[in-house]
Every structure is written in C-alpha cells, then in structure tokens.
Amino acid sequence: MPGSAAWAGAGPPTTQSSHRDPLLTGTYDKAAVAAELAALIKSAPVVVFTWSFSPFSKKACQLLDGLGARYTTVELDKVPRGFALKKELSKATDRSSVPHVFIRGESVGGCFDGPGLVPLYQSGELQKMLKRAL
C-alpha cells in the first residue's frame, strides 16, 4: 500500500506467528504501549491504523489514494506489539474496529463511522481536512 510503513521506532517486524504472540495473552506494559500509540498518532499528518485483511481498511486507503493524500499506514497485524496497540487504540477511542484514521492527531473514525472518511468525503470536509493537514 502506498504510504505503508511499519512503525520505525518499533524495530523490524518479527516472523513470530501471531498464535504465539505473548501479547495475545493480555500481558504487556500498558503505559509503554499507550505512549507508543500516542507517538504513532503524532508521527505523520495522516495516520491510518489498519488490519491487512480488512476490506474496510483497503477501502479507506483507496479513498485516500484517490485523493492523492500522503499518509502513514500502521498494519496492526504486522507490526510488533500490534495486538497491544489495537487494544490501547480501542480503549482510547471507544472503537474496536479498523480502519481508524487520524488527521493531525484527531480521530476521524473509520470508513463510515466516527464520523468516517466516506461521509466526510461526501460532504467535502475530508478534502479540506487533508489540505489543512498537508
């Protein structure tokens, strides 16, 4: 995906199978992961948290691509501590679904909710937000 990037500060992706990921057990340093999440959200003007097999994640990125937006993608199922990041993202935003898009550090939700990229695009607001962000 254009704009895709593993979080540079997180180190290289691991080849560890997700079913062996200790984070799935629910044990991780919550403060450290919350700080990492906050840094990710602020790491670029537009940040999209995705799941690689999510059709809504793909749709969100296609919409942003179609608008020529530059963005950073964090594929939560591929980065180290991704499950913990997803859990902290859910706690911070009261949304457990992906994609989750932030523009200038502000949550704009997913494709259709929170308010969502598609409704923002249809109203013309997304284009204005992206222009201000870049």
Image (cartoon, rainbow, N blue to C red):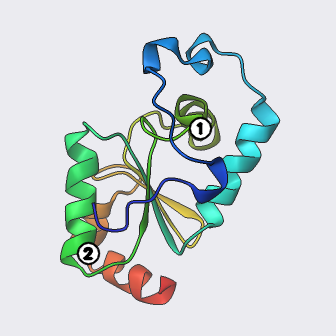
Q: Position of residue 85 (x, y in %)?
A: 59, 37
Amino acid type at mark 1: Leu
Near mark 2 (Cα within 10 A), the count class, few <14, some 14-19 or many ≥20, is few
Q: Which of marks 1 and 2 is in front?
A: 1
Q: Residue at x 53, y 35 (%)?
A: 82
Q: Is residue 100 above or below residue 133?
A: above
Give the image location of residue 9, x and y in percent: 66, 55
Circle 1 SS class:
helix
Image quadrant where residue 29 sits: top right
Q: Position of residue 16 (x, y in %)?
A: 48, 24
Expressed as whole percent of the image width and height from the top left, the position of residue 111 reads 29, 53
Give the residue type that dot 2 points to.
Answer: Ser
Q: Name the residue under label 1.
A: 85
Image quarter (top left, top right, bottom left or bottom right) of the N terminus? bottom left
CB under 8 Å between callouts 1 and 2? no
What number is the disc on residue 123? 2
Residue 1 placement, left or right of 92 = left
Secondary structure type for disc 2: helix
Residue 104 image-quadrant placement: bottom right
